[in-house]
Amino acid sequence: MSEGSDPALREARRTAVLGSVPSDSHHWNLIFLQLLLEEQGFTVTNLGPCTPVTDVVQRCLRLRPDLTVISSVNGHARTEGVALAHALRALPGRRDAALVIGGMLTTAQADSGAAARELLLAGFDAVFIGPDAVDRFLGFLSPSSALTPSGNPTPWARRSGVLAGAR
């Protein structure tokens, strides 16, 4: 029986919307992340590069994904990511959905720490930068991961009951 025809299997799959900041025209990071998310059991909607904020918002309203992932290679995530986080967190029923961003946050790498703090304050649950970013992202995606780095329950933990034993 295919996964698409079994409602129980369809329900068990986690869903993700993947995109970039509006000015980022890079493709390969999104393809890599799509494959990585699919390997972790997610059904992925890849919105492609140069994703307008309105497209991300509309897709999240329609699909109600467990996770929204924003990737940046051009260094404009610091400014454009804040507006995106505010727009997504303002949506009804999306306040607790997992929202992460990663890649090159600014064009000045020395500012990455400050940029990460700004993005977390804006509403991202996690910011993945640096040489261990992929490993930390994989840890975040683990089905047994009960909490996001910002302390919010992950949607997959709420759905699976993992939180019953979490503090």
Image (cartoon, rainbow, N blue to C red):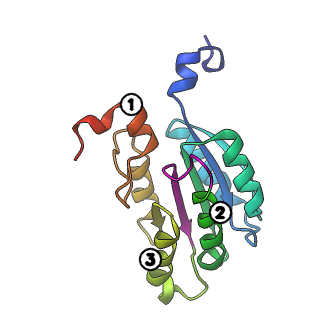
Sequence order check, earlier mark of 1 and 2: 2
Rounded to the nearest whole Å, what is the CA distance between mark 1 and mark 2?
Answer: 28 Å
Viewer can see residue 75: no
Rounded to the nearest whole Å, what is the CA distance between mark 2 and mark 3?
Answer: 18 Å
Q: Residue at x 55, y 63 (%)?
A: 101
Disc number lying in front (2 or 3): 2
Residue carrying label 3: 117
Label 1 neighbourhood size at 10 Å, few (<14), some (14-19), many (20+)? few
Query: Which range is magenta?
Result: 91-103
Q: In this rendered view, identify the residue nearer to me: 140 or 117.
A: 117
Q: Residue at x 68, y 57 (%)?
A: 19
Residue carrying label 2: 87
Query: Is there CB contact under 8 Å for labels 2 and 3?
Result: no
Query: Is there CB contact under 8 Å for labels 3 and 1?
Result: no
Q: Which mark is residue 160?
A: 1
131 relative to 107, above or below: above
144 relative to 137, above or below: above
Query: Is there CB contact under 8 Å for labels 1 and 2?
Result: no
Q: Callout 2, which amino acid?
A: Ala
User: Element under label 3?
Assistant: helix
114 relative to 7, above or below: below
Measured as percent of width and height from the top left, residue 163 is found at 30, 39
Picture quarter containing residue 104? Answer: bottom right
123 relative to 69, above or below: below
Q: Can you say which quadrant of the picture contains the N terminus?
A: top right
Rounded to the nearest whole Å, what is the CA distance between mark 3 and mark 1?
Answer: 30 Å
Q: Callout 3, which amino acid?
A: Arg
Sequence order check, earlier mark of 3 and 1: 3
Measured as percent of width and height from the top left, residue 149 is found at 37, 59
